[in-house]
Image (cartoon, helix red, strand yellow):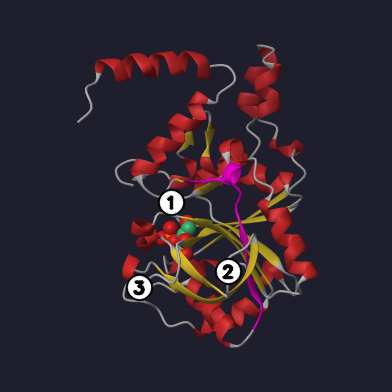
Amino acid sequence: MLPATKSQPKEMLPVARKPIVQYVVEELVSNNIEQILFVTGRSKASIENHFDHDPELFHALTQSNKQDLLKELEFDALKANFFYTRQRLQRGLGDAILCAENFAGEKPFLVALGDSILGLNAVSQAVSRMADVFESKRASCVIAVEEVPSEETLHYGIVEPEGDAEDVFRIVNLVEKPAPQDAPSNLAIAGRYIFSPVVFDMIRRVQPDKRGEIQLTDAIQFMCEEGRRVLAVKLTPEEKRYDIGNFPSYFESFVAFALADPLYGADFRRALEKLLDRTPAR
Ligand code: G1P
């Protein structure tokens, strides 16, 4: 997403009033996740700064009695502890997850991609449903999935369901970014996963792809091949995924969230309508 992301991470791009990563954190906290490790990189220090206390700003807002803003910036009040580590080389999502091995230890853990917001204002409770499924079905992996138009399969990891794809179903195979004619379904991996620690060994078995990246999808495929229980939980329509990985969907996400803004949404709608009247469609 250059040049927007030349000197800032895409996770820090604003969608309406907040950076994307803040929505992700709020979603996780509302799903009772209390320990959050950010796997960042060399150019992503602004993520740490965002969640840190800023004494000067705190002082200035206190002096001018901006209580509402102070409240919005009180990340300490969120019931979560933040930890940070860096992926030293850009070797793909699988490699990024290996950076969390010591943090996760022997326990199951959730992976949330920092460029995906689930639902308008991150209202999704999918992670809680996934955790229930993980426990009750004794799964090795649970993945959030959503339907995408067939022509878009080449942007996502696509899963192959066993039988009919109900709200919860077993996955028998996965393919990373297949062409529409090769896609086993139109159910895309939606950026939230729960894993048992066995995934780390699977990731270590993955060979880097043409771009030198270790694909997480390949590691999950190994789990399927070994007969481990890999399950999918479908997102509901209200949990629609806002993808900030490319400009068209970033623009759309920004406008959707701005229109829903309690303070500025109504005015923005009027401005947008005027703009649309004035701008002939191309
Ligand atoms: C990653 C995953 C892909 C998933 C997507 C969702 O791809 O590899 O399976 O569908 O996230 O956002 P990326 O967007 O990093 O290329």
Confirm if mark 1 falls within 8 A of ligand 1.
no
For the record, the magenta segment spans: 228-242
Task: Please give the label number shown on residue 182.
Answer: 3
Q: Position of residue 30 (x, y in %)?
A: 73, 44
Give whichever of discs 2 and 1 has the lower sequence position.
1
Position of residue 148 relative to residue 73, above or below, is below
Write down the residue under mark 2.
Answer: 164
Give the residue type that dot 3 points to: Asp
Q: Is 252 placed left or right of 28 in the picture?
A: left
Camera-nearest residue between 147 and 82: 147
Residue 179 shows in the view:
no
Residue that numbered label 1 is attached to: 43
The residue shown at (51%, 31%) is: 257
Earlier-in-chain disc, 2 versus 3: 2
Q: Residues within 10 Å of mark 1 (few under 14, many from 20)?
A: few
Which residue reaches farthest right?
A: 136
Kindly identify the residue that appears in the image at 65 percent across and 71 percent down: 141
Q: What residue sits 65% from the left and 82% below the top? A: 228
Q: CA distance from mark 3 to mark 1?
A: 36 Å
Residue 94 in view, yes or no:
yes
Q: Compute the Cα span from label 2 to label 3.
A: 19 Å
Q: x and y percent of residue 144 in the render? A: 59, 59
Task: Compare residues 38 and 130 and report the one nearer the observer.
Answer: 130
Secondary element at tag 1: loop
